[in-house]
Amino acid sequence: MRFAPFSKKQLRVLTWWRPGSPDRQKDAILCDGAVRSGKTLCLSLSFVMWATHCFSGRDFALCGKTILSLQRNLLEPLLPILRGMGYRLTVGLGRHENRFYLFGGRDEGSASLIQGVTLAGVLLDEVALMPRSFVEQALARCSVPGSRYWFCCNPEHPFHWFYREWIEKAREKNCLYLHFTMRDNPSLTPAIRRRYEGLYSGSFYRRFVLGEWCAPSGAVYPMFSPQTHVVEHLPA
């Protein structure tokens, strides 16, 4: 498979865990932003390379909203690339070999599916669509020394629990946060970018094209502002 040259932001995703990287001491990486911005492919490829170079004989988890969406959005683009790089589907490279399990975080009951396993790392694709109970259970499974968290998502509303707990607290959680736009994906031609830019309007444009976490259009109280209408203490 042939690649277009990676953007600087994509290269940062691919190398953040490598010796010599200024980000190598981070405990997690979080990529969010516009659709078709190239974040998912780079993150998943980096995850497998990191796991294979840094561990052997360990267990890892790939999580999506459902197993079907995980296979469609992540595995189908990723597996041909790994084969071309010499990786075996177990997954292994050289003398290193690890096990990768697939989990669907569809609803509150999904948390029980991942209980009990000990992981060296977890990748959560479409993490904003998963219930908090599943995400936190998956993170709790990562008790192997050197384990790390990998997150990827498109934006939802700005009061979403994941936005509040991870994006707003990325520095506090020692997480590398990278925001993607369509311009961070060199494989998209200018004509395709213009097509997407003309396809959406309003809050859909802000979410899908600009990658912003914003409230949907048609809100009951469109004039609501957290800065104006939210206070720490009620007036006397």
Image: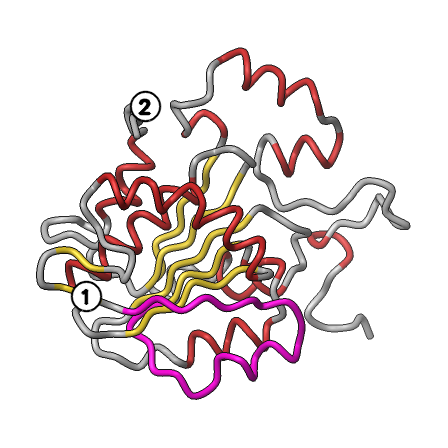
The percent position of residue 76, horizontal first and vertical second, equals 45, 45
Which disc is residue 183 wearing? none
Q: Which structural element holds mark 1?
A: strand
Name the residue nearer the viewer: 73 or 89.
89
Q: Earlier in the sequence, mark 2 or mark 1?
A: 2
Question: Going 15% across and 55% down the picture, which residue do you hit?
Answer: 93
Question: Against 199, is 23 above or below?
Answer: below
The percent position of residue 188, horizontal first and vertical second, equals 46, 21
Name the residue nearer the viewer: 155 or 49.
49
Question: Going 38% across and 67% down the picture, which residue do you hit?
Answer: 122
Please state if 222 lies on the left or on the right of 17 as rendered: right
Q: Residue at label 2?
A: 4
The percent position of residue 233, horizontal first and vertical second, equals 72, 73
Which disc is residue 97 wearing? 1
Question: Against 166, is 4 above or below?
Answer: above
Q: Which structural element holds mark 2?
A: loop
Span highlighted in magenta in the image:
99-121
